[in-house]
Image (cartoon, rainbow, N blue to C red):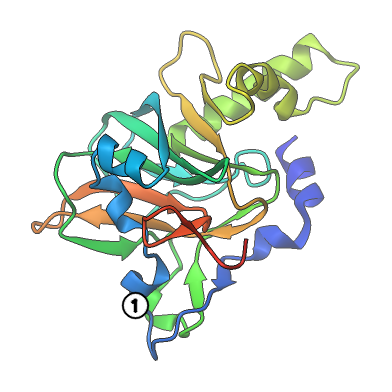
């Protein structure tokens, strides 16, 4: 099943670098995204900027190895190099112009001291040109946060579905559809295997298909406070639409 999805997604799955209008001579994380303040604004401040929020609930991180991916298009996405303590962490969506503009997962309280581009093994920020950035490819219109172990549970659920429906071509979207539909197609907090620890926060990628960067918000002692996926819908965390949309 996974091989079939990978082939169907096509060349976009090979893309780990996206081109963005970054004007510095070397990669600058603060120019790669101007939406970092989203995670530090109060609900009242966000509302004043016409940014709505959805608190999805907690993702169960069991191994500490976090994956962000389009779960249908790239079900074997490697986990980020940086790890977090095992635990249950809240996911929040930020909506603007009827789209999911960003998605965060919180590991600790407070405003990040600085931000880093999240990378997977084999990626080196120092190799990026001034108009490039690492990100994950979206080809099914979805993003997600999960533990690396949850990928195995998704595979287990696929096998269950295939066993129960041996004469049908199992599509994992059919598994997710009822949960997504219950939330107007915007998000689902999905548990692949009932009774087993490990779930996944799945959400609409507001910018559609493409390649989207993920960033670590770090405290001054280099501990992760938050993970942020920027879907390139707004800029400057002020509710203004990006010119490309």
Foreground residue, 161 or 37? 37
On screen, residue 174 versus residue 114, left or right, reads right
Residue at (51%, 78%) from the top-left corner? 21
Name the image quarter holding the C terminus. Answer: bottom right
Q: Where is residue 180 in the image (x, y as percent from the top left)?
A: 62, 23
Residue 203 occupies which quadrant of the picture? Answer: top right
Q: Where is residue 9 in the image (x, y as percent from the top left)?
A: 76, 51
Residue 19 makes an appearance in the image: yes
Residue 110 occupies which quadrant of the picture? Answer: top left
Name the image quarter holding the N terminus. Answer: top right
Foreground residue, 106 or 50? 50
The residue furthest right is 167
Residue at (45%, 14%) from the top-left corner? 196
Q: Mark 1 points at which residue?
A: 28
The residue furthest front is 48
Residue at (32%, 49%) from the top-left corner? 38
Q: Position of residue 237 (x, y in %)?
A: 36, 56
Residue 134 to residue 198: above or below: below
- Secondary element at image label 1: loop
Q: Where is residue 205 in the image (x, y as percent from the top left)?
A: 58, 45
């Amino acid at each position: 099943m996974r091989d079939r999805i990978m082939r169907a997604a096509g060349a976009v799955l090979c893309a780990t670098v996206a081109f963005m209008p970054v004007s510095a001579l070397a990669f600058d994380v603060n120019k790669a995204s101007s939406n970092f303040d989203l995670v530090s604004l109060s609900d009242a401040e966000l509302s004043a900027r016409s940014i709505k929020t959805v608190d999805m609930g907690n993702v169960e991180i069991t191994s500490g190895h976090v994956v962000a991916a389009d779960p249908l298009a790239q079900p074997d996405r490697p986990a980020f190099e940086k790890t977090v303590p095992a635990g249950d962490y809240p996911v929040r969506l930020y909506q603007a112009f009827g789209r999911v503009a960003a998605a965060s997962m919180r590991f600790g309280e407070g405003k990040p001291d600085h931000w880093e581009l999240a990378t997977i093994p084999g990626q080196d920020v120092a190799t990026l040109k001034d108009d490039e950035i690492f990100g994950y490819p979206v080809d099914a219109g979805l993003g997600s946060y999960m533990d690396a172990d949850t990928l195995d549970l998704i595979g287990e659920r696929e096998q269950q579905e295939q066993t129960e429906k041996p004469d049908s071509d199992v599509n994992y979207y059919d598994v997710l559809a009822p949960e997504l539909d219950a939330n107007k197609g915007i998000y689902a907090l999905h548990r692949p295997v009932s009774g087993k620890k490990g779930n996944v926060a799945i959400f609409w990628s507001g910018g559609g298909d493409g390649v989207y960067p993920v960033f670590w918000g770090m405290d001054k002692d280099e501990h992760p406070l938050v993970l942020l996926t920027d879907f390139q819908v707004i800029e400057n965390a002020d509710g203004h639409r990006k010119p490309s949309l």
